[in-house]
Image (spheres, rainbow, N blue to C red):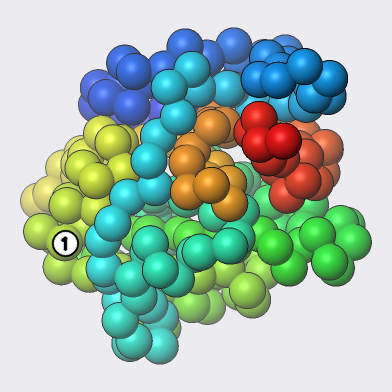
């Protein structure tokens, strides 16, 4: 499985500087207490889990969305991207959406996908909602001012998105090409870069739902 970490020419790997990832193979997490089963993940385990960030943006209905409180009790998949992205963004969304449809409803209901646009100038709320509905009507789309979106990326520890040629109306946007999975302990333990397949999500999502991360 070939895994691409970034889309286009994305800037620095701020988030990865604090993590040791084993990608392209199944990764087994270490037991934290005697007798604990070991979960095997196809995403990349983070040696120092990431705290779920605090920020507030606007959803596609125009309502205020508090990321921290709005995702409590769920497996939260966070991705920053844009609807004009030619390949990686739709690939991530399609694979996750297809995987959720193949999981038992009780499992799928515990997973919340949050897609935050990195291109607010073109990704208006209506267009963002229409695009996400192509993959799953339950996906949450968020937008905001450029300053608010930059603040959300900093809070999540991902590199800031940048336009490749702001003077060109057909510009591209460089952005972090990985999904951060926060589990019910409000920590991000696993990262899923480009190249993670539908089958990988089908394998990992039930594990994330059941995961206790060492709690007896």
Q: Is residue 78 left or right of residue 16?
A: right
Where does residue 15 sit, x and y in percent of width and height?
A: 33, 27
Residue on which the image places disc 1: 148
Give residue 161's quadrant in the image.
top left
Viewer-proximal residue, 40 or 117?
Answer: 40
Mark 1 crowdedness (10 Å alpha carbons): few <14, some 14-19, many ≥20:
some
Count of marks, rendered view? 1
Residue 201 seen anywhere in this rendered image of the structure:
no
Residue 204 seen anywhere in this rendered image of the structure:
yes
Residue at 47 percent across and 41 percent down: it is 187
Viewer-proximal residue, 207 or 30?
Answer: 30
Viewer-proximal residue, 97 or 167?
Answer: 97
Residue at 48 percent across and 77 percent down: it is 129
Which corner quadrant holds the C terminus?
top right
Give residue 200's quadrant in the image.
top right
Viewer-proximal residue, 50 or 158?
Answer: 50
Residue at 27 percent across and 70 percent down: it is 57
Where does residue 177 sit, x and y in percent of width and height?
A: 44, 35
Q: Is 84 above or below relative to 57? A: above
Residue at 58 percent across and 22 percent down: it is 45
SS state under label 1:
helix
Give residue 193's quadrant in the image.
top right
Which corner quadrant holds the N terminus?
top right
Where does residue 6 sit, x and y in percent of width and height?
A: 42, 28
Q: Is 160 above or below relative to 130? A: above
Q: Is residue 76 left or right of residue 141?
A: right
Where does residue 178 sit, x and y in percent of width and height?
A: 48, 35
């Amino acid at each position: 499985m070939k895994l691409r970490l970034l889309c286009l020419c994305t800037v620095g790997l701020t988030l990865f500087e604090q993590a040791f990832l084993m990608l392209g193979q199944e990764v087994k997490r270490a037991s934290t207490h005697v007798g604990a089963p070991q979960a095997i993940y196809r995403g990349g385990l983070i040696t120092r889990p990431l705290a779920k960030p605090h920020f507030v943006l606007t959803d596609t209905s125009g309502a205020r969305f508090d990321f921290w409180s709005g995702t409590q009790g769920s497996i939260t998949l966070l991705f920053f991207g844009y609807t004009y992205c030619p390949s990686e963004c739709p690939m991530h969304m399609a694979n996750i959406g297809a995987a959720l449809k193949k999981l038992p409803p009780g499992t799928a209901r515990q997973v919340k996908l949050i897609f935050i646009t990195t291109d607010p100038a073109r990704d208006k709320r209506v267009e963002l909602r229409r695009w996400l509905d192509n993959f799953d009507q339950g996906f949450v789309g968020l937008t905001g001012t450029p300053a608010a979106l930059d603040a959300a990326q900093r809070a999540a520890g991902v590199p800031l998105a940048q336009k490749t040629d702001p003077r060109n109306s057909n510009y591209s946007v460089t952005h972090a090409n990985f999904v951060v999975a926060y589990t019910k302990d409000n920590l991000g333990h696993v990262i899923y870069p480009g190249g993670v397949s539908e089958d990988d999500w089908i394998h990992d999502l039930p594990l994330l739902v059941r995961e206790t991360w060492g709690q007896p």
